[in-house]
DNA sequence: CGTTTAATACTACCATAGTAATACTACCGC
DNA sequence: GCGGTAGTATTACTATGGTAGTATTAAACG
């Protein structure tokens, strides 16, 4: 069993994963560019993070000439699921209703969004 | 402004906060006991964590004889909101529908829970 | 060919979370 | 009053995330 512990991703690591999910086979320079100039990071910072993340099994690379082409080694669904479940379990004891209730009371919600939610729930209901 | 950065709580820290929200004015021994014997931690581990958390402004204490009585210095709502928002923003770009959709597809959901969610949404709708 | 240069590798910090042993200290019971 | 004990204080160590400088190497260009 792998048991990647696919939660516990730092902010930068998650941003890098997002880049790799969208652009597989990215070089260090590609990732740095994709993070945008707002994220004022050194080239070597990204390179180091990618190496550390590869150690952890989050990403992998293949060689292309002198360059490494990195790609995500775990899917977005797995990470999302891991991180979300972790939070829901830790903070709301796994109660779905508690999470949604919390979200509805603490965030700005538009009428459109509410309609969207109703649709989601109706669909799920039919599926049961 | 304090800007407590009220997310980024480790697991143990969150468990301690939960204890203090339920039992204010708890001693180190009280917290340790409340965490249960399953959590096999040393007395000094809790004491150290509490001191570190006090440095960060998460908890505070008052003196009672030789003992410190600890209480939470930030509310449960603030922590929940901070942690949840952080995750929703980082992982789902702030989209409520995306979060709920994800929760519905990745977790076991009972018909009762769905009904509960519908009720929550209906209530919110009326409130707008 | 030799030199610039672009790539990775190595090393080194700092911060925070978690964990705990050890040291100090003051009260309480005898 | 003295010693045990119940507290806190100090110190320390591991792991991980973030950040980046320096070293090395190999390719490319003239």
Image: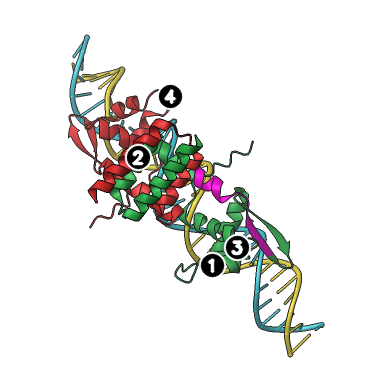
Chain colours: A green, B red, C cyan, D yellow
The CA span between labels 4 and 2 is 37 Å
Same chain under badges 1 and 3? The reply is yes
Pointers 4 and 1 in contact (CB under 8 A)? no
Q: Is residue A70 magenta?
A: yes
**Residue hosting label 2:** B118
The CA span between labels 4 and 1 is 45 Å
The CA span between labels 2 and 3 is 38 Å
Q: Horizontal placement of A74 versus B40: left or right?
A: right
Q: Outermost residue, front direction? A: A126
**Residue A81 in the image, given as x and y percentages of width and height:** 50, 44
Dividing the picture into quadrants, the one containing residue B68 is top left
**Residue hosting label 1:** A34
Q: Chain of mark 1?
A: A
Same chain under badges 2 and 3? The reply is no
Rendered residue at 43%/57% (across/down): B93
**Residue hosting label 4:** B38
N-terminal of the pair, mark 1 or mark 3, is 3
N-terminal of the pair, mark 4 or mark 2, is 4
Q: Which residues are magenta?
A: A68-82
**Residue D28 in the image, given as x and y percentages of width and height:** 74, 79
Q: Which mark is residue A23?
A: 3
Pointers 4 and 2 in contact (CB under 8 A)? no
Inspect this view and state whether residue B12 appears: no
C25 or D21, which is in the foreground?
D21
**Residue B29 in the image, given as x and y percentages of width and height:** 30, 26
Q: What is the secondary structure assignment of the residue under circle 1? A: helix
**Residue B33 in the image, given as x and y percentages of width and height:** 33, 24
Pointers 1 and 3 in contact (CB under 8 A)? yes
């Amino acid at each position: 069993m792998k048991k990647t512990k696919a939660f516990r991703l730092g902010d930068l690591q998650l941003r890098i994963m997002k880049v790799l999910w969208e652009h597989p086979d990215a070089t260090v320079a590609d990732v740095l560019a994709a993070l945008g100039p707002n994220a004022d990071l050194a080239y070597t910072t990204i390179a180091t993070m990618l190496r550390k993340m590869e150690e952890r099994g989050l990403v992998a690379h293949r060689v292309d000439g002198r360059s490494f082409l990195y790609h995500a080694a775990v899917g977005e669904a797995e990470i999302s699921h891991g991180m979300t479940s972790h939070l829901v379990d830790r903070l709301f004891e796994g109660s779905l209703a508690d999470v949604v209730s919390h979200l509805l009371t603490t965030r700005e919600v538009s009428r459109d969004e509410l309609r969207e939610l109703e649709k989601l729930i109706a669909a799920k209901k039919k599926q049961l």
